[in-house]
């Protein structure tokens, strides 16, 4: 199905470089930009498997949105003891500044990036929920466009669902929560490593691409400074993180925020996509509770599984973690990204003992997970097809209703046998084909 | 119980004109279980429309933007507040919203808990929000402070008694000295320095209380007999918030008016602004609080 496509790999990568499809990483305090290598062998998801995955993702994101609304409002799930307050409010992503604010339509996570892996048993496991402006949709989007251009034959009448409507879907989400005015994509600027994605998505969604200095707030309304007139903004899809959003509400040192943006948001005059404060629902400690949220808010059995996770906070889990630390992956809840993640099997006995002591001392700070052995995908490296571990970031959009983009970002590990698919570790990406039949 | 009237004036002078000046003020008192705002208003110059909002901590906000160039910015808030520090039984659980205060004007005084809409009513309604038990940017204890808190509280039993012991210890440990610290000084820096102003006294006491597991928060306000704004501490004793002033080493009484509170200074600044123009600024503040009864 993809044999002829693979021969175009170098050409597609050249085009990606020309477009500026890059990502930025910090290493030893130095910021670098790198190309993100594309592998033309797609991840293929059969129609039936997709249907199941789609239902599970919608369910999960609906529950996460319900949790955020509850957390910043009535706090019923905490009162009922389903999520302990120690976890709910200790998260650094919880922003008390957002207490009592209900966003338009009650939606907090408009664009959710759910990271999954497919186990050897064929079951999908969620590894992480990303509810704070997850990035990466533009990679498969632009890759698909280039693939079609290089090899139209493969796609003409092929069984893969078209994924080029992401911009249209994004626009529908922005329209659904719009409080009156234009849609804007707010970028920190052209020197940001994701600037390509910001401009590409703005164009595809028919939104205005704005830098912070082009926006201002007056009388509780957000405006875009146009050469002709000031235009009211009804939805801002901001690609800068919460702390930099509004120097008069969050980090006062922020030079890239929009002063008093939060006043327009509080007054219900602008939708912020995604809502500030979402970090309270996507941190490592809260992850454990997401299946419970599905049951609590929706009264349904969770369709998607978490990787089996233990909270040493609970005595039974503590016992299990102490007895099995050498085969578990231990994560420090306070650390972000890939930091603070330790595989028990990689540690010398002494280091493992020290880690166990830390866990006993501060049980709330850690979670432990079973290591999931996930599937490899064929990957074309050095002129041959070799197996590489790969994950999937699915994009779930919540507006009028919640839907899943029939595609996604598949990332693969560079080295054979490695489970590290992070782009910062030199991995690459693939297109994701969802079959329609 | 006292009826206090106040006038609080702040003027910022810029060395050269600034423009596109966005600001947030927390210069009007709010209703609390021990404080009822009878009347309050603010006058801002240059004149500009002001939006009244409430932040996530329940503080009243006055928000605006001045587009045109200006070299002075001032606000004068005035009002009348009934204070009864002994009457703290009103429920104020976490997630609670403060009783609303009508925009810049008078409110019905309302009796006790009637006006309190608490979304955390029920058994846990009287608990402090868990964020006040966690360290925050400006009020986190280091090892030296944790040891100090342990030692200073050995004789005390119960949260309130511990708070009084710690307040006394902070008062002994820190010297009140102006201009040795600034708004970016943390509790541990002030503690190591051994001096500071009311903001530093408050941050240090908050950090010490939290290190012993007692929820504590920062309070900005006005007091009788002081010409500037003041900062103190509220600690939660398990059922309610109680105010204590480490700068004067005393529990708060009916001479204190609460303007705003938060985890620390950063959450509840009385005045903050962002503008264009590289001007230096200096600030003049004048505060007068009168006990109405003693006037008569």
Image (cartoon, grey):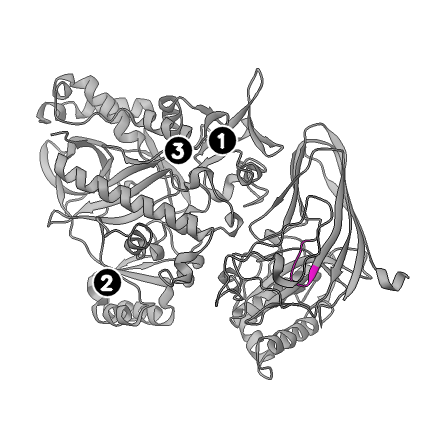
Farthest residue, direction bottom: B155
Residue holding disc 2: A344
How far from the left and from the top, in percent, is residue B65?
Answer: 66, 34
Residue holding disc 3: A193
The C terminus of chain A is located in which quarter?
Answer: top left
- Say left or right for A322 vs A95: left
Which chain is home to disc 2? A
How far from the left and from the top, in percent, is residue A306?
Answer: 24, 53
Give a yes or no on whether discs 2 and 1 share a subunit.
yes
- Mark 2 burial class by Cα count in 10 Å: few <14, some 14-19, many 20+: many
B245 over A176 or under it: above or below: below
How far from the left and from the top, in percent, is residue B9?
Answer: 79, 47
Residue holding disc 1: A179
Give the magenta-colored segment's residue range. B30-35
Dominant secondary structure (helix, strand or loop) of the stretch shown in magenta: loop
Rendering quarter of residue B240: bottom right
């Amino acid at each position: 199905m993809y044999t002829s496509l693979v021969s175009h790999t170098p050409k597609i990568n050249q085009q990606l470089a020309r477009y500026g499809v890059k990502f930025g990483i910090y290493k030893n305090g130095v910021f670098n930009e790198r190309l993100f290598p594309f592998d033309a062998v797609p991840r293929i998801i059969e129609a039936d498997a997709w249907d199941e995955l789609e239902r599970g993702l919608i369910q999960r994101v609906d529950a996460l949105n319900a949790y955020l609304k509850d957390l910043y409002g009535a706090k019923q799930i905490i009162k009922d003891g389903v999520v302990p307050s120690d976890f709910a409010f200790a998260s650094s992503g919880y922003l008390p500044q957002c207490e009592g604010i209900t966003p338009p339509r009650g939606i907090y996570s408009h664009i959710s990036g759910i990271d999954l892996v497919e186990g050897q048993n064929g079951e999908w496991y969620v590894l992480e929920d990303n509810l704070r402006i997850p990035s990466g949709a533009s990679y498969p989007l632009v890759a698909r466009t280039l693939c079609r251009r290089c090899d139209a034959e493969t796609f003409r009448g092929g069984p893969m669902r078209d994924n080029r409507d992401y911009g249209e879907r994004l626009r529908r989400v922005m329209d659904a929560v719009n409080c009156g005015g234009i849609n804007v994509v707010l970028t920190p600027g052209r020197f940001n490593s994701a600037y390509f994605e910001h401009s590409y998505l703005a164009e595809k969604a028919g939104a205005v691409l704005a830098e912070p200095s082009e926006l201002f707030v007056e009388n509780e309304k957000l405006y875009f400074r146009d050469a002709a007139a000031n235009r009211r903004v009804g939805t801002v899809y901001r690609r800068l993180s919460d702390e930099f959003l509004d120097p008069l509400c969050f980090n006062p040192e922020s030079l890239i925020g929009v002063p008093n943006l939060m006043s327009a948001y509080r007054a219900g005059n602008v939708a912020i996509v995604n809502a500030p404060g979402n970090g309270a629902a996507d941190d490592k400690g809260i992850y454990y509770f997401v299946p419970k949220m599905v049951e609590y808010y929706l009264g349904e059995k969770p369709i998607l599984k978490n990787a089996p996770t233990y909270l040493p906070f609970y005595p039974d889990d503590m016992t299990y973690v102490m007895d099995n630390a050498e085969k578990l992956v231990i994560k420090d809840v306070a650390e972000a990204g890939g930091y603070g993640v330790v595989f028990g099997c990689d540690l010398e006995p002494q280091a493992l003992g020290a880690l166990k002591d830390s866990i006993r001392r501060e049980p709330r700070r850690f979670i432990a997970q079973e290591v999931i052995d996930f599937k490899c995908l064929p990957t074309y490296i050095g002129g041959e097809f070799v197996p590489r571990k790969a994950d999937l970031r699915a994009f779930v959009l919540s507006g009028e209703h919640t839907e899943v983009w029939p595609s996604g970002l598949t990332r693969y590990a560079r080295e054979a046998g490695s489970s590290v698919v992070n782009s910062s570790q030199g991995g690459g990406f693939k297109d994701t084909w969802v079959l329609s039949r | 119980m006292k009826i206090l009237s106040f006038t609080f004036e702040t003027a910022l002078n810029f060395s050269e004109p600034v423009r596109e000046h966005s600001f947030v003020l927390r210069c009007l008192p709010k209703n609390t279980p021990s404080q009822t705002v009878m009347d309050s208003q603010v006058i801002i110059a240059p004149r500009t429309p002001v939006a009244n909002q409430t932040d996530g901590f329940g503080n009243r906000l006055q928000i605006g933007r001045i587009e045109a160039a200006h070299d002075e910015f001032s606000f004068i808030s005035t009002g009348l507040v009934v204070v009864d520090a002994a009457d703290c039984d009103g429920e104020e659980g976490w997630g609670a919203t403060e009783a609303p205060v009508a925009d810049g004007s008078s409110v019905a005084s309302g009796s006790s808990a009637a006006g309190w809409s608490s979304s955390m009513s029920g058994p846990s309604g009287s608990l402090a929000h868990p964020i006040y038990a966690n360290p925050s940017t400006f009020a986190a204890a280091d090892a030296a402070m944790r040891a100090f808190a342990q030692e200073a509280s050995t004789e005390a039993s119960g949260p309130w008694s511990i708070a009084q012991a710690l307040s006394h210890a902070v008062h002994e440990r820190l010297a009140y000295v102006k201009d040795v610290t600034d708004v970016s000084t943390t509790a541990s820096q002030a503690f190591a320095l051994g001096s500071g102003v009311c903001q530093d006294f408050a941050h240090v006491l908050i950090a010490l209380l939290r290190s012993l597991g007692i929820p504590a928060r920062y309070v900005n306000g006005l007091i009788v007999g002081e010409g500037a704004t003041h900062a103190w501490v509220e600690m939660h004793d398990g059922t309610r918030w109680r105010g204590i002033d480490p700068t004067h080493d005393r529990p708060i009484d009916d001479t204190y008016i609460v303007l705003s509170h938060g985890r620390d200074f950063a959450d509840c600044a009385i005045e903050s602004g962002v503008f264009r123009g590289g001007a230096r600024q200096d600030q003049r503040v004048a505060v007068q609080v009168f006990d109405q009864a003693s006037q008569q």
